[in-house]
Image: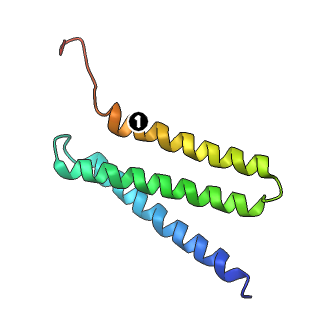
Amino acid sequence: MSEDIPAVSFTVTLYVFLMIFFWCVSAFEKMPHDSKNRERLKILVWVLATTLSLMFAYRVWTMVRPGVALGLLVWGMVGITSVITFYFFFVFGDKKTTSAEE
């Protein structure tokens, strides 16, 4: 019975983070592009997405600990995904140009 407590707490925490993430993405999409709160929400969305990815990677790592190569692959995928989403969210940003703007 006591072995189930970490699994249940992980699942509940993951579910709560996922619901907050979906709410933040929904609110982010509804905000005007020039809103200062939109930028703050963008940071929160990225942090939540990265946290969820790290939580999944940790869970996989605990299940396949003898398979170090698979665990490192999962951690590497999380790292690459985090860096790519950071780039597209904050560096590349909302630089949508059309031929009319040039």
Question: Of the residues shown, which amino acid type is indicated by label 1?
Answer: Tyr
Label 1, on which residue?
87
How many marks the image carries: the answer is 1
Residue displayed at 19% across by 12% down: 102
Up the image or down, 14 lies above or below 29; here it is below
Q: Nearer the viewer, residue 35 or 83?
A: 83
Residue displayed at 31% across by 34% down: 93
Quadrant for the N terminus in the image: bottom right
Residue displayed at 67% across by 62% down: 59
| Label 1: how many Cα within 10 Å (few below 14, some 14–19, many 20+) | few
Residue displayed at 45% across by 40% down: 85
Q: Nearer the viewer, residue 68 or 47?
A: 68
Residue 34 location in percent, x, y? 16, 41
Disc 1 element: helix
The answer to whether residue 74 is left or right of residue 22 is right
**Quadrant of the rendered image containing residue 88:** top left
Q: Nearer the viewer, residue 98 or 88?
A: 88
Residue 52 location in percent, x, y? 52, 57
Residue 51 location in percent, x, y? 49, 58
The answer to whether residue 87 is left or right of residue 102 is right
The answer to whether residue 17 is left or right of residue 102 is right
Residue 54 location in percent, x, y? 56, 56
Up the image or down, 68 lies above or below 4; here it is above
Colouring rule applied to residues: rainbow
- Residue at the extreme bottom of the image, as rendered: 1
Up the image or down, 42 lies above or below 80; here it is below
